[in-house]
Amino acid sequence: MRFDRLWRHATLATLAPERTGVGLIADAALAVTNGRISFAGPMRELPAAACAREEIDLAGRLVTPGLIDCHTHIVFGGERDEEFALRLAGVDYADIARAGGGILATVRATRAAADETLFAAAAQRLRALMAEGITTVEIKSGYGLDVASELRLLRIARRLGQRLPLGVVTTALVAHAVPPETDRAAHLAAMTGELIPQAVAERLADAVDGFCDLIAFSAAEIRAVFQVARRHGLPVKLHADQFADGGGAALAAEFDALSADHLEWTGAAGVAAMARAGTVAVLLPAAFHCLREHNRPPVAALRRAGVPMALASDCNPGSAPVLSLLTVMNIGAVQFGLSAEETLAAVTREAARALGRLHDIGTVEVGKRADLAIWNVERPVQLIYWLGRNPLHARVWGGQ
Ligand code: NIG
Ligand code: FE
């Protein structure tokens, strides 16, 4: 039996769904062939004749699926440090948004930036994520807010996926904010009537997203957007209940959303609806932290109801200026009460589920893409125990 690469003596966290916890296998072997996992199991089950072009002794190091950041707004122009300073002085995020700052400030800077500037800045941020073992990232548009600008952001996101050794899943964030040059109805009409069909025609979007909240769009407005997405065969996801329980989680579930994200104010009805629909809860602890939120997502209720929980960076220049998923994991565990095992599952298996990609990535199982992170630690909890320590030993993307 000849593999392309063979790692021996790993501590393997498979995250395979039928195994308990993170599916730990002590003294494991792992092999890849043609970029796919071709063996994952105890060393003693490795056929005696097994060999490979490249053989590596991991001396007990932990191997996990490559990490997945399933919610980012990583393509944007400008910075919002002045707003950050205002918030430190006590000004509210919502008040900044209502005064034309917030998302609209980034829209102005993004529209003014050249393609190459946006591409280079996003690539640099992605490299920071990759240095922590991220192998797949979701990228949303949403800072263009007119049809041409949104398509431009989606094209840049696609190009990032073609140029970097990284899986990129794109999302058209079609209802993020109303741009200054138009009114709500006209904006939504353009986004649904023009942006979605054009994005579909060019295969630029893997999903459709919206922002359902007091400072953004109502459930009725989002429902109309989701109906168009459904007609075009695109799965949906939603920024839901971040600042108030506006029924966002239940609305997402009604449309069989891949995920409902944020959820700080989601109540019992939203949790139950998500459980019924199999919608993943994507929790965004960096936004919670940076906006000094107090209401925590209903983690205990989500757990009881069997709703899968993912964690993501929400990387953006406003609510979540963060380029470290390991830091996000620590905040998620400490502030939201996820166990070490739940935290690792949240950035691997459950993040893959939230992207509709669990058939291909997110666990270490034979047949899946060989996207792996190899760590200089022995136990999963050591990944999140220290803040600011990056124990990545090696990152493997498609077997390379
Ligand atoms: O996920 N909630 C809406 N959108 C982003 C924030 C965008 C911004 O502030 O620029 C979020 O937090
Ligand atoms: Fe977001």
Image (cartoon, rainbow, N blue to C red):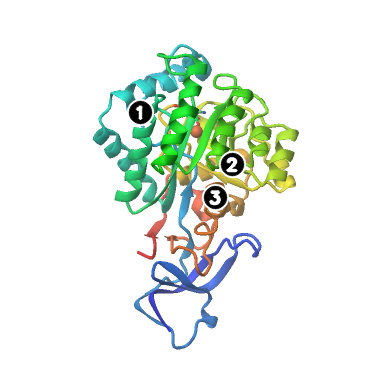
Residue drawn at x 35%, y 26% as measured from the top left: 79
Disc number for residue 356: 3
Amino acid type, callout 2: Ser
- Residue ID for mark 2: 259
For the residues labelled 2 and 3, the Cα–Cα distance comes to 9 Å
Question: Can I make out residue 127 in this image?
Answer: no
Disc number for residue 149: 1
Amino acid type, callout 1: Ser
Please say if 297 is above or below 51.
above
Quarter of the image with the N terminus is: bottom left
For the residues labelled 1 and 2, the Cα–Cα distance comes to 25 Å
Residue drawn at x 64%, y 38% as measured from the top left: 255
- The first of marks 2 and 3 along the sequence is 2
- Where residue 32 sits: x, y (%)? 42, 71
Residue drawn at x 39%, y 20% as measured from the top left: 105
| Front position in the image: 281 or 256 | 256
Residue drawn at x 49%, y 44% as measured from the top left: 70
Question: Can I make out residue 345 in this image?
Answer: yes
In the structure shown, which secondary structural element does the residue marked by tag 2 occupy?
A: strand
Query: Around disc 2, counting alpha carbons within 10 Å, would you say few (fewer than 14), some (14 to 19), or many (20 or more)?
Result: many
